[in-house]
Image (tube, rainbow, N blue to C red):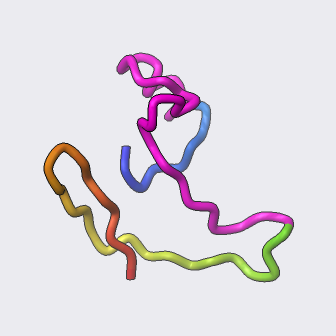
């Protein structure tokens, strides 16, 4: 699910896979890149994914 936009389609997929869609058990973390309080959007490019043990991290440029 790394790098995916949190939208209805992803929420349905998470629920189908038995993942708490509210992330109450620490299933996922988010990063906000644009919104009404931003003067400019934050442009991030996904450079890759780094598995570490049972976790996986997104690497950005």
Q: Is residue 33 magenta?
A: yes
Chief SS of the magenta region: loop
Q: Position of residue 9 (x, y in %)?
A: 54, 31
Q: Residue furthest left?
A: 53
In the picture shown, does residue 15 fall above or below 32? above
Quarter of image, res 42: bottom right
Instruction: Identify which residue is drawn at 43% across, 76% down.
Output: 45
Drawn side of residue 22 relative to residue 57, left or right: right
Drawn side of residue 48 relative to residue 15, left or right: left
Instruction: Identify which residue is drawn at 36% across, 20% down.
Output: 17
Q: Which residues are magenta?
A: 9-36
Q: Position of residue 50 (x, y in %)?
A: 21, 63
In the picture shown, does residue 11 fall above or below 61? above
Q: Is residue 52 magenta?
A: no
Quarter of image, res 51: bottom left
Instruction: Identify which residue is drawn at 44% across, 26% down.
Output: 13
Q: Position of residue 47 (x, y in %)?
A: 31, 74
Instruction: Identify which residue is drawn at 49% across, 49% down.
Output: 29
Drawn side of residue 35 relative to residue 52, left or right: right
Drawn side of residue 36 relative to residue 18, left or right: right
User: Which quarter shows the N terminus?
Assistant: top left
């Amino acid at each position: 699910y790394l790098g995916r936009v949190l939208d209805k389609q992803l929420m349905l997929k998470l629920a189908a896979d038995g993942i708490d869609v509210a992330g109450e058990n620490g299933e996922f973390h988010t990063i906000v890149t644009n919104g009404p309080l931003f003067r400019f959007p934050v442009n991030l490019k996904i450079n890759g994914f780094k598995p570490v043990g049972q976790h996986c991290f997104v690497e950005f440029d």
